[in-house]
Amino acid sequence: MEISMLISILGILGAMLLLVVLVMRGVNIFLIAFICTAVVALTGSINLYDAYKLNYMDGFVSFLKANFFVFLTGTLMGKAMEITGGAKSIAQMLIKGLGKEKALIAIPLACGILGYGGVSAFVISFAVFPIALQVFMEANLPRKYIPAALCFGCSTFAMIAPGAPQIHNAIVANALGTDIMAGAINGFITSLFMLVIGCIWLYKMVKKEKLNGNHFIAKPGDTISNENEKMPKGIIALIPLIFTVLLINLKINGTKIVQLETGLLIGTILALLLMWNFIKKEEILEEIGVAIKSSIFSITNTCAVVGFGAVVKSALAFPMIVNAMAEIPGPATSGAALGTMVIAGICGSASGGLGIAAPLLGPVFLNKGVNVDALARIMVISSSSLDSLPHNGYIVTVTNGICNEKHKDAYGAVFKLTVILPFVATILAVILFSMFPNLP
């Protein structure tokens, strides 16, 4: 191996390790991306100015152009469900319907329903946490499992399901030219596997903990959800979500009639109209402004990482690394799954990982003859595993910020349900798509 090639490989590996370390330390993601870009460029035979001006910005702008309106409309949908009380009402409806004994399982179910309807994970977690807190207090369950219930519901089975109006489906669809319903049958089987096994596993973990004598211990600042709070009926709150999913997946003569962004916007307007009486009218413009700012912040953070990925793509050693992934023994899709999983883990983000992996690895595996729909679904599913390592921004926000728990207490259960379970589900998906690659 030439010395320049070895230096480039070490540069890519070193930059990715540095990215993880700096993210864990809470350094600004733009600063991290700029530093890691310099490492890759200087070791990968790329002119430093070109690396920033051309490679980095091409990746940044391309991702922004392709996905901004999905981020924006998805955030607006979440804000509509938040300010109308729709998200809370759906959660309460499920909990009351299942009863106190099964109320624990209602938490990830409520998160999953909201997620499949297009509401962002952060909005769901903020909305459902007070209800989860009430469930855990009334059932005297160990409080440290609330983050696991929320993260499992928001970032696994619903996020990666076919047809979900989530950014993960959109990124892969834009990169590979597929539909967000790509790989539907095997994808739904995998999502159902995650849902059933995850709910059973969560229930057993909490039950075992309670039998060992652990119980609910309140923390300062805990406030219980007010059941008498004026909210819409849960069934009414579901209508915009169901309508959105149906609308964006509706086809006439094989042609989609409503694009994802348009469907999310229509769903947002419908949510506001149906639940208009539950909105504080004087605050609505301010809330919409907050949602727009939030969407810009979210997508530019992801763009920062995707821009770094574009620089990695131009490094001297990148073709060799991709070829190594493509030659991994076993089904052809296993290399795509592993590559996506590792990149998402390094980024600490499923969407950021997909933003890098889909345009970089996708063409390689398509050239190997992999069915495009199978490849799209496997990449989405595999992105939901290692992305949930401790440095993931969503995991940190939910565990430490929303739930006021420490990683050492709560992350064990989060790891089982959001890393191990999706990892096993990825293996299942690879097997299913290897056996039945051409199923719809």
Image (cartoon, rainbow, N blue to C red):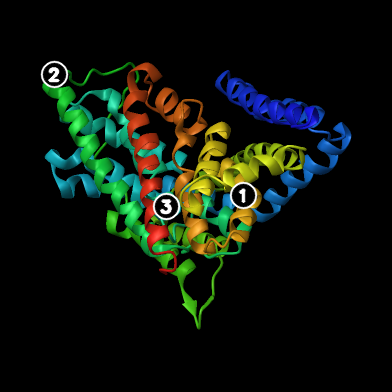
- Distance from disc 1 to disc 3, alpha carbons, whole Å, reads 16 Å
* Crowd rating for badge 1 (residues with CA inside 10 Å; few <14, some 14–19, many 20+): many
Residue designated by label 2: 212
Residue designated by label 1: 361
Q: Residue 81 at what x, y percent from top left?
A: 42, 50
Tell me the mark number nearer the camera, choosing from 1 and 2: 1
In this orientation, does residue 278 appear?
A: no
| Left or right: 185 in relation to 265 | left
In this rendered view, identify the residue nearer to me: 239 or 388: 388
Q: Which mark is on residue 58?
A: none
Q: Quadrant of the C terminus?
A: bottom left
Callout 3 secondary element: helix
Residue designated by label 3: 430
Q: Residue 29 at what x, y percent from top left?
A: 65, 29
The quarter of the picture where residue 297 lies is top right
Q: Residue 410 at what x, y percent from top left?
A: 34, 23
Q: Is 346 placed above or below 142 here?
A: below
For image coordinates 54% across by 43% down, the residue present is 340
Callout 3 amino acid = Val
In this orientation, does residue 389 appear?
A: yes
The quarter of the picture where residue 163 lies is bottom left
Q: Is 177 placed above or below 391 here?
A: below
In this rendered view, identify the residue nearer to me: 317 or 396: 317
First in residue order: circle 1 vs circle 3: 1
Q: Residue 259 at what x, y percent from top left?
A: 56, 67
For image coordinates 28% across by 54% down, the residue present is 234
| Left or right: 166 in relation to 432 | right
Callout 2 amino acid = Asn
